[in-house]
Image (spheres, coloured by chain):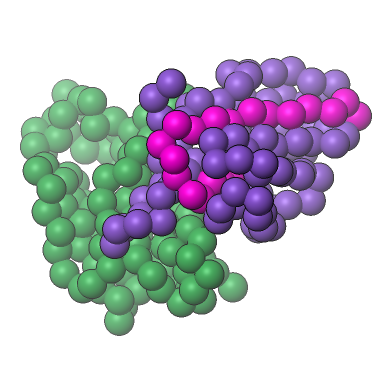
Amino acid sequence: IAGITQAPTSQILAAGRRMTLRCTQDMRHNAMYWYRQDLGLGLRLIHYSNTAGTTGKGEVPDGYSVSRANTDDFPLTLASAVPSQTSVYFCASSDGSGSSNEQFFGPGTRLTVL
Amino acid sequence: GQNIDQPTEMTATEGAIVQINCTYQTSGFNGLFWYQQHAGEAPTFLSYNVLDGLEEKGRFSSFLSRSKGYSYLLLKELQMKDSASYLCAVRDSNYQLIWGAGTKLIIKP
């Protein structure tokens, strides 16, 4: 693994089903993030984690949950999917050091809820 | 509220120069980022400004004026591969990134 991986690449899901999007990074970054990206809108933060064992809510957390059991993994769960959760989901990480502390992004998961 | 504004779409010619503007109103300021995103791909980091002035990195430069809440990304010697969306983001007082909707740049031969 090099960088951040996400799985699945894409998924079509029936409304009401439970779904977990996986995210794994091998850069030993402390902070991880989940965003959704919708046409015409900027990336919106769903949840974040500044370090293993801690999580926080972003701008649009409703309907989503996360966990951060270790440094590498940061899964995002939709407990009961709804059509408005159709989006492209990006996981990102940053190491918290240096002046810029830029975020590195995974390749994304394209989710369609019918 | 927090707001990042950038043009929706711009068109430029191969070999030319283009400037993409970004204005922001956020609760606090801890740096401004520019990312490039090709269609169907993840955003990738281009530049970071935290102090006023110009940061140059090869064909790309980014400018910041904190007093005006303004930044621009300057792309020189445009190449077809520069066709992408360019995302402006500001790190706010909570150290979270607030993102603009992105500017789709179309390069014509």
Residue at image point 51% right, 61% down: B96
In terms of secondary structure, what is the magenta stretch mainly? Answer: strand
Q: Is residue B59 magenta?
A: no
- Residue B9 lies, in percent from the top left, at 38, 43
Letter of the chain shown green in the rendering: B
Q: Is residue A17 magenta?
A: yes
Residue at image point 87% right, 34% down: A80
Which is more toward the observer, A27 or B6?
A: A27
The quarter holding residue A101 reads: bottom left
Kindly tell me whether residue A38 is visible in this rendering. Answer: no
- Residue B30 lies, in percent from the top left, at 38, 70
Q: Residue furthest bottom?
A: B67
The quarter holding residue A100 reads: bottom left
Kindly tell me whether residue A49 is visible in this rendering. Answer: yes
Residue A29 relative to residue B12: left or right: right
- Residue B1 lies, in percent from the top left, at 59, 73
User: In which quadrant is the C terminus of chain B drawn?
Assistant: top left
Which is more toward the observer, B11 or B105?
A: B105
Which residues lie in the magenta part? A16-35
Residue B23 relative to residue A53: left or right: left
Q: Is residue B49 above or below residue A51?
A: below
Q: Residue furthest right?
A: A16
Chain A drawn colour: purple
Q: Is residue A95 above or below residue A37?
A: below
Tell how many labels: 0
